[in-house]
Image (spheres, grey):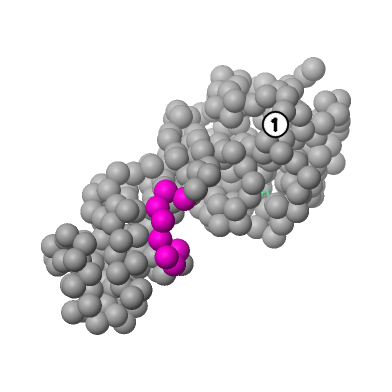
């Protein structure tokens, strides 16, 4: 069956249907077959899998996913594109299109009766991190999330402790997933070309979180405090953000084996879990 495979295909469909690229919705469509196929391959999709695609656009990737998967559930916000997308995907017979804002969608209810769920998407870049965090925090029953995002965001998701890219989002991703960058994608692979380079990240969802901690939300508020003011020491950042007295924070650090002048950016998720359990007491 036919797939969209070139800029010419995309421009023709857009003009025949009086569609315009909505910059505000992050509409940069991937046309390069090599990268389209590489993203689908990163998902290791089989005929048992139900794939959730966020932001299918004209369906450049949707049809390729449909060929490999049992079913694709595609959630697209742009109601001008949806009728065109329905026509393009109809011949495959296994694509369900939902016209909705992913941020307002109860993804768990869409997949309540499904198994072997995978998320594969070329995300709208204005909303990358909120979408990933929504999927993880709502604990959708998925095996993995494969997403194309801005390269600099991808580097933050998989950063090592102590590096400039390491931050609260790195720790959240590490808590829920085992993640890696699969490959980079140049701006010229999209129409229109975005101003940034892109990368595909694969996040395998952990059956159990990476650390055991008594109060997860308290740990994340400590992480937020530590990275909210990166230049401050852990003691000063946590003291000013969470109003915990300095002596208690110093005691926690020393008990857990750290120097009292340590900064949050060198602490691992395991370190934050230990400190959180101590400080909670
Ligand atoms: N999947 C296509 C591709 O690979 O070329 C399009 C990807 S484009 C980067 C992002 C898509 O997400 C656009 O089609 C846009 O309309 C859609 N989108 C933007 N915000 C959305 C939201 N909040 N919920 C669902 N879809 C959204």
Query: Which image quarter: residue 261?
Result: bottom left
Residue extending farthest to the top is 1
Q: Residue 17: where, in percent of width, then height? A: 82, 37
Can you say whether 65 is above or below 252 in the image? above
Residue at the (80%, 34%) spot, across then down: 95
Q: Does the magenta stretch mainly form a helix, a strand or a loop?
A: loop
- Residue 150, image x and y in percent? 47, 42
Residue at the (76%, 29%) spot, across then down: 70
Residue appearing at x 32%, y 53% in the figure: 270
Q: Is residue 109 above or below residue 201?
A: below
Query: In which quadrant will I find the N terminus?
Result: top right
CB at disc 1 and ligand 1 closer than 8 Å: no
For the C terminus, the quadrant is bottom left
Question: Percent position (x, y) of residue 219?
Answer: 39, 65
Mark 1: secondary structure = loop
Nearest the eye: 202 or 128? 202
6 vs 149, left or right, is right
Expressed as whole percent of the image width and height from the top left, the position of residue 166 reads 32, 50
Question: Residue 121 is drawn in which quadrant?
Answer: top right
Ligand 1 positioned in quadrant: top right
Res 67 → quadrant: top right
Q: Per the image, is 125 magenta? A: no
Label 1 belongs to which residue? 49
- Which sits in the foreground, 125 or 211? 211
Query: Looking at the image, which residue is at 70% across and 52% down?
Result: 107
Determine whether, in the image, residue 250 is placed left or right of residue 191.
left
Q: Residues within 10 Å of mark 1 (few under 14, many from 20)?
A: many
Range drawn in magenta? 209-216
């Amino acid at each position: 069956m036919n797939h969209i495979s070139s800029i010419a295909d995309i421009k023709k469909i857009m003009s025949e249907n009086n569609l315009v690229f909505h910059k505000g919705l992050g509409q940069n469509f991937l046309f390069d077959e090599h990268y389209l196929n590489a993203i689908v391959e990163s998902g290791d999709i089989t005929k048992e899998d139900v794939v959730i695609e966020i932001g299918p656009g004209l369906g450049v990737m949707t049809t390729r996913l449909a060929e490999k998967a049992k079913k694709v559930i595609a959630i697209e916000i742009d109601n001008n594109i949806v009728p065109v997308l329905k026509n393009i995907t109809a011949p495959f017979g296994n694509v369900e299109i939902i016209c909705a804002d992913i941020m307002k969608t109860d993804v768990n209810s869409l997949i309540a009766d499904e198994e072997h769920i995978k998320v594969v998407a070329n995300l709208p870049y204005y909303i990358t991190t909120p979408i990933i965090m929504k999927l993880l925090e709502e604990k959708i029953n998925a095996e993995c999330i494969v997403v194309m995002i801005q390269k600099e965001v991808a580097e933050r998701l998989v950063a090592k402790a102590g590096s400039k890219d390491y931050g609260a989002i790195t720790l959240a991703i590490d808590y829920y997933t085992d993640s890696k960058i699969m490959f980079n994608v140049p701006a010229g692979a999209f129409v229109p070309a975005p101003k940034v380079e892109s990368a595909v990240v694969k996040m395998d969802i952990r059956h159990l979180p990476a650390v055991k901690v008594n109060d997860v939300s308290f740990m994340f508020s400590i992480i937020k405090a530590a990275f909210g003011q990166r230049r401050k020491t852990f003691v000063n950042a946590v003291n000013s953000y969470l109003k915990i007295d300095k002596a208690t924070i110093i005691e926690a650090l020393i008990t857990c084996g750290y120097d009292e002048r340590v900064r949050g950016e060198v602490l691992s998720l395991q370190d934050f879990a230990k400190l959180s359990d101590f400080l909670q007491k």
